[in-house]
Image: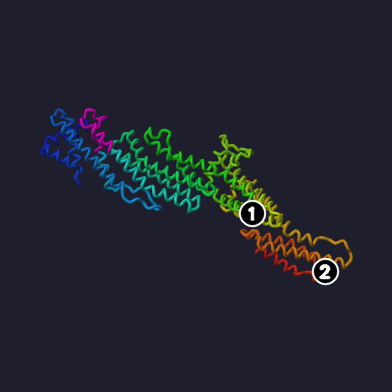
């Protein structure tokens, strides 16, 4: 005989030889499993089940079937009670390093013993003629549904405070860390779902594939509702001020993209009815992606609007807001490079320019798709060019060339320094295409030349003008006039630079320009002085010595 039949016959012998009466067996079943007596209770239910299988003609078969049904219900109640105990209590504090607390070892051992026994009970699919089969199935279905409900709600409660904290902090910390923090929370939700699935597969009384999938759908329902709620709150926050939160969106999108395949796997384990055409996390990712796609053309549009300033004539020589915005944007760009490249590939080459009609020539990979790196370079080039062009346009609104030249130099040099000379992010230099570098260098040289022409070339030009009269008297008068004009112009330059500071953020470049100014002006002044040394008392027209002039000029650039 097979081992199963041998074991069953052995149980029958135990029933036959037992000294306990039917009334005692019934009392044990009705009391339910007592502390420390689970083995005894399981044995009693198993004896009753065996007696029905081999003595189905007995008159007490119906009574025994009812007792087996009662035993199954009592065991299911114990199962539910144990699950409830480990699915309640204090939820983790927001911000704490956290994962779902494991089941206590003693509870897990008891649950596994219970589940192993419950899975052995007769069901209509395995014992079609068993009188208690249908009731047992209904009892176990209820217990399994209760397990899924309790674990899902408990997981949702534990995850909720962590998710809300991400939204609360999004407005108080830097955008990229805030986006990554949200991504980590989504990953935590993923880990919890995965862990719960493995527990569910071990601890469910009905282990068929369809029942497991249905129970997992029930368990996931409150968790996915929480995800949708938190995600919607995040997107709503981002849409309130896309320029402010664009990198939060990109960082969150990048993190979620990296774990989407794992989410697809987890969600595919739900029942067919639930998962058909529904993937809440992928929907959330697509929503974030749409927000990211909007951010690129809107950012460039903001840079273009910078060319109009605040209306009226330009009077300020300091850094304009859109130039500082450009540097902050470029500083964050390498931190989410993968997300930016992926989003630009979807947006399409040049489409971030909001329909200007000119696309940069596409570079294709062997697979025929646009290369993300090339698209990123094209976008970076457009950012640099748009920002520089807006600075140039804004500088032309001033009616005072000298003031405009200082404004232009300050803003172009700021872009040049932080993007090219000393990039605000180590990876930024490699992201700049050569065309963008050339554009920055060219405009920096032009801005510097314009600054010299408007502020110091007039000083040199005054000293360089020659008089055609040969008389000593007239030469002396011309010398006096030139020096007077020179020192008057110098005074204007000094007065202008008291409130129009030059390149305040770049000490080295400022010092270098100062040296060039000194070389230009002092050399001309010394040459002029040397040329007119034979004139009668030429020094009496010199308000200060070349050395003193040099000291004054250097003070501009300290």
Compared across the picture, whether 69 is left or right of 543 comes to: left
Label 2: element kind:
loop
In the orientation shown, which residue stands out farthest toward the front? 312
Relative depth, front residue between 40 and 344: 344
Can the viewer see residue 427 in this picture? no
Q: Which residue is mark 1?
A: 411
Compared across the picture, whether 468 is left or right of 286 comes to: right
> The C terminus appears in which quarter of the rendering?
bottom right
Can the viewer see residue 211 in this picture? yes
> The N terminus appears in which quarter of the rendering?
top left
Instruction: Give the answer, above or below, for where 96 lies relative to 217.
Output: below
- x and y, in percent, of residue 75 in the image: 23, 40
- x and y, in percent, of residue 42 in the image: 20, 40
Residue drawn at x 87%, y 68% is 473
Residue drawn at x 37%, y 34% is 271
Tell me if residue 448 is in the magenta stretch: no
Label 1: element kind:
helix
Mark 2 and mark 1: span between their CA atoms?
A: 43 Å
Tell me if residue 138 is in the magenta stretch: yes
Provide the residue span drawn in magenta: 117-142
Q: Which residue is mark 2?
A: 533
Badge 1: how crowded within 10 Å, few (<14), some, or many (20+)?
Answer: many
- x and y, in percent, of residue 505 in the image: 61, 59
């Amino acid at each position: 005989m097979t081992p199963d039949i041998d074991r069953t016959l052995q149980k029958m012998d135990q029933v036959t030889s037992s000294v306990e009466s039917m009334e005692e067996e019934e009392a044990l079943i009705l009391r339910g499993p007592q502390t420390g007596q689970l083995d005894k209770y399981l044995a009693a239910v198993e004896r009753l089940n065996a007696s029905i299988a081999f003595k189905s003609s007995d008159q007490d078969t119906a009574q025994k079937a009812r007792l087996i049904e009662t035993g199954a219900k009592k065991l299911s109640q114990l199962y539910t009670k144990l699950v409830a105990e480990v699915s309640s209590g204090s939820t983790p504090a927001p911000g704490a390093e956290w994962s779902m607390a494991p089941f206590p070892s003693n509870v897990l051992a008891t649950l596994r013993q219970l589940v192993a026994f419950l899975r052995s009970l007769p069901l209509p699919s395995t014992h079609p003629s068993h009188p208690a089969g249908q009731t047992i199935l209904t009892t176990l279905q209820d217990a399994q549904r209760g397990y899924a409900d309790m674990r899902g709600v408990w997981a949702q409660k534990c995850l909720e405070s962590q998710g809300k904290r991400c939204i609360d902090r999004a407005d108080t910390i830097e955008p990229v860390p805030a986006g990554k923090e949200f991504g980590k929370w989504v990953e935590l939700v993923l880990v919890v779902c995965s862990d719960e699935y493995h527990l569910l597969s071990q601890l469910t009384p009905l282990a068929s594939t369809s029942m497991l999938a249905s129970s997992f759908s029930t368990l996931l329902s409150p968790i996915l509702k929480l995800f949708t709620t938190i995600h919607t709150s995040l997107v709503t926050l981002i849409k309130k001020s896309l320029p402010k939160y664009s990198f939060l969106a990109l960082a969150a999108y990048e993190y979620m993209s990296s774990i989407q395949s794992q989410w697809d796997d987890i969600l595919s384990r739900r029942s067919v009815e639930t998962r058909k055409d529904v993937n809440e996390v992928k929907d959330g990712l697509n929503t974030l992606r749409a927000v990211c796609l909007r951010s690129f053309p809107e950012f460039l549009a903001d840079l273009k609007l910078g060319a109009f300033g605040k209306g009226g004539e330009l009077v300020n020589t300091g850094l304009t807001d859109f130039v500082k915005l450009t540097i902050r944007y470029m500083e964050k760009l390498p931190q989410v490079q993968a997300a930016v490249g992926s989003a630009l590939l979807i947006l399409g080459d040049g489409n971030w320019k909001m329909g200007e009609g000119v696309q940069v020539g596409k570079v294709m990979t062997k697979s025929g798709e646009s290369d993300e790196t090339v698209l990123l370079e094209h976008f970076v080039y457009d950012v640099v060019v748009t920002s520089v062009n807006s600075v140039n346009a804004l500088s032309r609104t001033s009616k005072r060339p000298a003031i405009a030249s200082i404004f232009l130099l300050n803003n172009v040099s700021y872009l040049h320094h932080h993007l090219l000379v000393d990039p605000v992010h180590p990876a930024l230099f490699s992201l700049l295409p050569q065309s963008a570098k050339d554009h920055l260098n060219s405009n920096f040289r032009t801005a510097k030349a314009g600054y010299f022409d408007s502020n110091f070339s007039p000083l040199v030009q005054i000293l360089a003008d020659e008089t055609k009269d040969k008389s000593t008297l007239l030469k002396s008068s011309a010398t006096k006039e030139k020096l007077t004009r020179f020192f008057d112009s110098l005074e204007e330059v000094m007065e202008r630079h008291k409130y129009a500071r030059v390149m305040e953020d770049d000490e080295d470049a400022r010092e270098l320009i100062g040296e060039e100014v000194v070389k230009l002006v002092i050399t001309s002044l010394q040459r002029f002085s040397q040329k007119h040394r034979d004139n009668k008392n030429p020094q009496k027209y010199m308000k200060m010595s070349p050395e003193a002039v040099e000291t004054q000029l250097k003070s501009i650039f300290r």
